[in-house]
């Protein structure tokens, strides 16, 4: 049996980035679609390069011209036929021409828009033929391994939480599957508005069944009791505030006080009051009195509901015993 802190969250990607254009151009090729997996550095979108190639040629010619001028001016400067100021002006023109050439080369490289991270294409925002401008978003990428769940735990429960702690994760849209999580980090501060602490869980998913945005129920396991005695929760008598059950003993219903421990789902831990193998009536307790005769009609595995027992005092005639087991 385990005890846990339970809460809810939406799954989030490990990293999610907007892919932006860094130069101007027409979209010539889109190499990926939504859902495709990409690696860091892969080309995602190609922009037209004709205009950039012309600009590159112009920058190369301009640099050649200013280099020729610089060579002549340097010779005159060495002969003291050109002033120092004129020589410095030509030298700066050479440097500016080199910077302009590098800038065009960089724009040409930016015409191939590449993946900044490895991940999955979540969103495509452009079409072939669109005119793209600098800082315009073209795609959205997300790293989905692992996914994260960011939850908020009440301050009074924080003494039960630590990094590396195990968690159980149930996904609303995948009711038949269970996922394991682990606490990656705990915020060092308490939110003064809500009185809670943000806790980030890591949820591995090697098969790719989980998606960002899925609604998850998160149960952080805070304690675990092994080899405990458990019974179905429905075996408890609810007509009083005490924790009592009816046990079948020598053909009669015997009301027994129990001390309870952890509660998990439809099962409850019994710390004191029962012994392993006791039969606990789980259905038909209404109207049943202590000491009334009952007749078991079948047995079931320990710690699970079993067949009923007949009793003349039972409202439906079939109070069901269940074995108490570990």
Image (cartoon, rainbow, N blue to C red):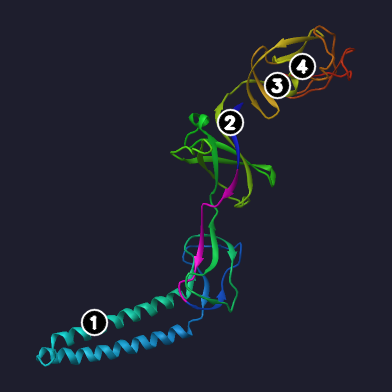
Q: Quick one: label 2 or label 3, which is nearer the N terminus? A: 2
Query: Label 1, on which residue?
Result: 92
For numbered disc 2, what is the local secondary structure?
Answer: strand
Disc 4 from disc 2: Cα separation: 28 Å
Q: Earlier in the sequence, mark 1 or mark 4?
A: 1
The reply to whether discs 4 and 3 touch (Cβ–Cβ < 8 Å) is: no
Looking at the image, residue 161 sits to the left or right of residue 75; the answer is: right
At horizontal 35% and vertical 78% (from top left) the residue drawn is: 102
Placement of 79 over or under 302, stated as above or below: below
The disc, 1 or 2, on the residue closer to the chain's N-terminal end is 2
Question: Which mark is in front, 2 or 3?
Answer: 2
Q: What element does badge 3 sit on?
A: strand
Mark 3 Cα shell of 10 Å, populated few (<14), some (14-19), many (≥20): many
**Mark toward the start of the polypeptide (3 vs 1):** 1
Q: Which mark is residue 239?
A: 4
Query: Which structural element holds mark 1?
Result: helix
Q: In the depicted view, which residue is nearer to us: 172 or 297?
A: 172
Query: Residue 260 location in percent, x, y?
Result: 64, 18
For disc 3, the marked residue is 231
The mark closer to the camera, 1 or 2, is: 1
Label 4–label 2 contact, CB within 8 A: no
79 to the left or right of 292:
left
Magenta span contains residue 236: no
Residue 149 appears at what percent x and percent y? 56, 45
Q: Which residues are magenta?
A: 9-23
Secondary structure under the numbered disc 4 in the rendered image? loop
């Amino acid at each position: 049996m385990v005890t846990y802190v339970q809460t809810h969250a939406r799954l989030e990607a490990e990293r999610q980035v907007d892919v932006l254009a860094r130069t101007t151009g027409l979209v010539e090729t889109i190499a990926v679609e939504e859902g495709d997996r990409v690696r860091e550095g892969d080309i995602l979108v190609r922009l037209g390069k004709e205009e950039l190639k012309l600009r590159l040629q112009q920058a190369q010619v301009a640099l050649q011209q200013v280099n020729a001028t610089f060579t002549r001016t340097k010779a005159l400067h060495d002969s003291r036929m050109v002033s120092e100021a004129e020589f410095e002006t030509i030298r700066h023109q050479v440097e500016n021409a080199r910077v302009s050439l590098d800038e065009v080369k960089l724009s040409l490289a930016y015409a191939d828009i590449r993946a900044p991270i490895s991940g999955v294409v979540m969103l495509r925002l452009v079409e072939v033929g669109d005119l793209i401008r600098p800082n315009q978003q073209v795609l959205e990428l997300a790293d989905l391994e692992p996914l994260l769940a960011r939850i908020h735990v009440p301050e009074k429960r924080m003494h039960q939480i630590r990094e590396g702690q195990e968690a159980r994760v149930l996904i609303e849209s995948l009711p038949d599957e269970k996922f394991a999580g682990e606490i990656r980090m705990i915020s060092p501060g308490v939110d003064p508005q809500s009185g809670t602490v943000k806790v980030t869980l890591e949820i591995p998913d090697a098969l790719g069944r989980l998606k960002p945005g899925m609604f998850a129920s998160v149960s952080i396991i805070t304690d675990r009791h092994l080899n405990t005695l458990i019974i179905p929760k429905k075996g408890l008598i609810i007509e009083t505030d005490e924790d009592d059950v009816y046990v079948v003993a020598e053909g009669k219903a015997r009301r027994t006080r129990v001390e309870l421990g952890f509660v998990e789902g439809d099962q409850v831990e019994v710390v004191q009051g029962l012994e392993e193998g006791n039969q606990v009536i789980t259905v038909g307790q209404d109207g049943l009195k202590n000491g009334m005769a009952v007749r078991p009609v079948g047995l079931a595995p320990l710690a699970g509901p079993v067949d009923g027992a007949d009793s003349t005092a039972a409202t439906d005639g079939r109070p069901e015993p269940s074995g108490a087991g570990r």
